[in-house]
Image (cartoon, grey):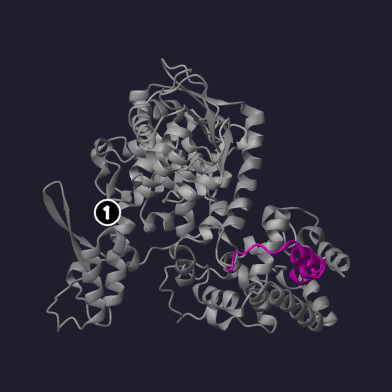
Amino acid sequence: LLRVLQTLQSLCSVSHVEDHSSKKNEGLVTMELVHILRGINLDDLWLQLTACLKAVKILEGITSLDETKVGEEGEDDGEGDGSHDEARTDGGDASSEDNDGAVAKKLQNSSAGFLTRFLPVIEAFFIANASSTREEAAGLGEPNTEADSPDKSYDDGIEPKDGDFSNLVGGKKVLSFVAENRVLLNALIRNNQALLDKGLRVMVNVSRCRSFLDFDVKRQWFKTQIRRLRQQASRRNGSLRLSIRRRHVFEDAYHQLRLRNADELRSRLHITFRDEEGVDAGGLSREFFGILAKEMFNPNYALFTSTEDGCTFQPNQHSSINPDHLSYFRFVGRIVGKAVADGFLLDAHFTRSLYKHMLGLKPTHHDMEAIDPDYYKNLKTILEFNLADIGLDLTFSIEDHSFGSSQIVNLIPDGRNIPVTDETKGRYVALVCQHRMTTAISSQIKAYLDGFYELVSRDLIAIFTPRELELLISGVPDIDVHDLKKNTEYNGWKATDPEIEWFWNVMFSLSRSEKASFLQFVTGSAKVPLAGFAELQGMRGVQKFSIHKVAGSNGALMSAHTCFNSLDLPKYKTEEETREKLLYAITEGQGAFMFA
C-alpha cells in the first residue's frame, strides 16, 4: 500500500504534472490525487491503525492524559507557543533535558521494535492525509472552522497562519492523529531521524504539528540541517581563522567578521589568542563565545538594557547614541547565529519578546511582565477594571522620555486626540506593548535579525518555541553535580578512592557560582549541554568529563584541559586541602591558556 501511495503521490505531484521542479512546488499534489484517495476510502484502515497504536501505548503504560491534554492545548494554541509549551518546559524544563516525563519517554527495545512494524502504514497515512494542495483541501469536507474563524482570540501572540494546515488533504485527521500518538511518533523519529525529511515531514512543515515534537527531536533535526550547511561551507572556504587580543575580543571580532559573507561564517571556527600558546581544539572557541556573551551587554556599547530582574536583556531604545549601533546589532545577531549553528552555548538571556521576534511571532502584553513588572500590573488593571472606576483619562498616545526630554508619541494617527474607552482599551494595551517591544526598537531588531538569519535561516529556527529557543542558545541554567558525577570517567583513579570521594564532597558543597566557575575551568564554558553531561562536547565529539591521576605531584595545583574536558587531580592528604586547591584553581587559574 505504501508503495502504491508513493507512486500515486509522485505521479500527481505538481512538479511532475507541470514538468518543472521548484522549491515552492515541493510536496504539492494536484486535486486528482485527492479525488483518487476519496474514491479508495481508507478510513477503516486508519481506524485499525489507531487501535493497534493504542495497544502499543497500553503496553508501554502511556496514559491518555499524556497525549490528549497536549493535543487539546496544541489545537488551541496553533503553534504550541501557548499554555502547553509553558507546562512542558517551564515546569522544571523536563522536556528540555530529554526527560519530559511520560511524554518524552524512550520506549523499551521490544516495544520500539514492535512499533516499527507499523511504520509503513503510518507513512501511508501521512501520504494519504498530509499531502498538500494549492487549493484549500479542508473545504472538501473538513472545514477548519475553529482555526479560521475571524473571531478566535489568539491571546498567546501567535497569529493564525493555518494556510499550511488547511491545504492538507486531511488536515483535521492529521492533527488528531499526531495529537493522539505523539509519544509513539517521537519514539519513531528518535530511532530514525530521516523520517522528518521523508514520510513524516509534515511534522516539521506544518506549524500546528510542530508543537507535538519533543524538544530533543527538534534539536536533533535542526543540528542535522545545520551540519549539512557547515560541511558544504567548510569544503568551499576551509577554516574561519581569527586572531584575537584577549583584552579587545569584541572589537577584534567585530572588525574581522564584518566583511565576511554568510558562507564564510559557516566554516569551522579557529581562534588564536595573541601572545598565548593555546591551540584551539574547541576550548578556545568556547571561551571566545563566553567573552563575547558578556561583552555584547557591556553598557559602554549601549546596545542592550537589562530588565527589572537584571537577568534578561532587550535592545536599547536609545542605542543610537552609539553611531555604529545598527552595525553592532547585526554583528551580535551573527555571533548568536554562529554559536547556535556551531553548538556553542552562550551565557546570554534575552527577553521573551525578542525570542518571539526571532521566530516570527508577535509579542503580547503578557511578555511585558518580564520586562517591567510594575508597568505590566498597570496594564492588567486597565484591562480588568472600568476606566472611570480607576480614574484614568487616556488617549491613544504615550509619553516617551529620552536624554532628559519628553515627547508625545501617537500610537495611531492623531492618537493624542482620540480618547481610550472601555471598548477600545484592549487595542490601547496591545498598541502600547507593541510600541515598547517592537516599534520603538524596530531598527535594532531588524539589524539583529538580519545578522542572525545569515547563519540560521528563518525556516529552520521556526520549529522551536520561544522557551526552547532560549534553551538552544543558553543551555540548561542549573548545574547538576549528580549528573556530572554519573557521567565522569576516571584515569588512574577509582570512584571509591578517598581522594575522589573528597573531590565530590567538595563539589556538592560549592555555591552555584563556584560550580559555574569550575565548569568554566574544565570545559571552557559555564553552560550545561542541553541533554546533560552525557553529551558534553570535546574535540572528538561527545567527550565526557574525566579525572586523571597525576603521579609524583602530591600537593600540586589542579590543572585542566578544556579541549578534552579533563581535570588533572594530584594526590591530596585531606578533604580540606582538596577544597583549598580546587577553589584556588577555579578562581586564579582562569583567564589564559598555556601549554603544560
Is residue 260 visible in the rendered image? The answer is no
In the rendered image, residue 126 lying in the magenta stretch gets the answer yes
Q: As drawn, is 161 to the left or to the right of 8?
A: left
Res 65 quadrant in image: bottom right
Q: Which residues are magenta?
A: 102-127
Residue 307 place in picture, x, y as percent = 27, 54
- Image: 365 above or below 341: below
Q: Main secondary structure of the magenta part?
A: helix
Q: Secondary structure beneath disc 1? A: loop
Q: As drawn, is 25 to the left or to the right of 334?
A: right
- Image: 558 above or below 119: above
Is residue 574 visible in the rendered image? The answer is yes
Q: Viewer-proximal residue, 204 or 179?
A: 179
Residue 438 place in picture, x, y as percent = 34, 57
- Image: 536 above or below 106: above
The residue furthest top is 275
Q: Residue at x 28, y 38 (%)?
A: 298
Res 494 quadrant in image: top right
Structural crowding at the residue carrying mark 1, measured as other residues with C-alpha within 10 Å and reported as few (<14), some (14–19) or many (≥20): some
Q: Viewer-proximal residue, 398 or 290?
A: 290
Location of mark 1 (residue): 307
In the rendered image, residue 490 lying in the magenta stretch gets the answer no
Q: Viewer-proximal residue, 391 or 309?
A: 309
Residue 447 place in picture, x, y as percent = 40, 44
Q: As drawn, is 422 to the left or to the right of 254?
A: left
Residue type highlighted by circle 1: Thr
**Which image quarter holds the N terminus?**
bottom right
Q: Residue at x 51, y 24 (%)?
A: 550
- Image: 482 above or below 201: above
Q: How many marks?
A: 1
Residue 95 place in picture, x, y as percent = 53, 61
Q: Viewer-proximal residue, 550 or 437?
A: 550
